[in-house]
Amino acid sequence: MPQKIVAGNWKMNGTQASLSEIQAIAETTQDIHCSAILCPPAHLLHSAARLPGQLAIGGQNCHHAPSGAFTGDISAEQLADCGAFYVIVGHSERREGYSESDSLVRAKAQAALKSGLTPIICLGESQEQRAAGKALEIVLAQLSGSLPDDPQVIIAYEPIWAIGTGLVPSVAEITEVHDALRTQLYTIFGAAGQDISILYGGSVKPSNAQEIFAITHVNGALVGGASLKAEDFLPIMRSLAES
Ligand code: 13P
């Protein structure tokens, strides 16, 4: 059975003062029956990982090399050294903003696994690709190109047009993509592919979480804006626990 997971991606938001918000999340997660992961910006990782509670910490990106002359980058090993257990790879903001290809995302996922981190591999089509009827084709190609050899991964389907816009795909659209991802994971990994959690991401809020979590093969969410406040993040976790 895939694990139920709510992961928060803080992106480039937050300062030391935000640790109190992470603490509020960490203190409450142990009372909610689903896994919670928070990916704060890199400078908060070390402190966030030391807060008491059941909140696992993840990075938002890593370099594919273990170390070396890569100014401004962080390796998977360094994330693990901060106390992280997860790392987001292939977020559309990196695929688009830094021209990250499927093969680079795959190399990052392999590097994460090598350092003992579970990669959260993001996939998703643009508005133009969906309008052209190519959403499924694009997302499945990203999956095959980005997956490492090992099934110890989490997948996040995040349609680019739904990120930070308040737009959410219909239940039928999410169902179609998640069903296809599950089938392809089974084809690639066999039975182990059935246990991989597939998260939905893109404008998930307390108000729409219940409807999204009722969809077959949606095993949780990757949350941006609504992960910044405990008062928004915790109700999303509760919706998943009750689903
Ligand atoms: P929002 O929840 O703000 O739409 O962001 C989603 C996201 O990009 C998470 O990685």
Image (spheres, grey):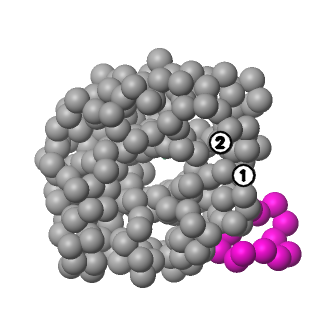
Which type of secondary structure does the marked residue at label 2 adopt? helix
Residue 140: within the magenta? no
User: Label 1: how many residues lie within 10 Å, few (<14), some (14-19) or many (20+)?
Assistant: many
The percent position of residue 90, horizontal first and vertical second, equals 51, 63
Mark 2–mark 1 distance (CA, rounded to whole Å): 7 Å
- Viewer-proximal residue among 75 and 12: 75
In the displayed structure, 92 sits above or below 212; it is below
Q: Can you give x and y, in whole percent of width and height, for residue 176 in the image?
A: 16, 56
Lateral position of residue 181 relative to residue 24, left or right: left
The location of residue 227, given as percent across then percent down, is: 50, 32
Reply above or below: 75 against 12: below
The answer to whether 146 appears left or right of 41 in the picture is left
Q: For the magenta stretch, what is the residue range?
A: 63-74
Q: Which residue is mark 2?
A: 49
Residue displayed at 17% across by 43% down: 215
Quadrant into which the C terminus falls: top left
**Which circle marks residue 5 in the picture?**
none
Please report the residue visible at 47 percent of the width from the left and 58 percent of the height from the top.
120
- Residue nearest the observer in this picture, 200 or 97: 200
Which residue lies under the disc numbered 1? 82
Which residue: 22% across, 65% down? 194
Q: Residue at x 66, y 51 (%)?
A: 83
Most common secondary structure along the magenta stretch: loop
Marks 2,1: beta carbons within 8 A: yes
Q: Earlier in the sequence, mark 2 or mark 1?
A: 2
Q: What is the three-letter code of the residue carrying label 2?
A: Ala
Residue 167 seen in the current view: no
In the rendered image, the quadrant that contains the N terminus is bottom left
Kindly indicate the quadrant of the structure image that contains residue 14.
top right
Name the secondary structure under disc 1: helix
Residue 162 at x, y percent in the picture: 38, 43
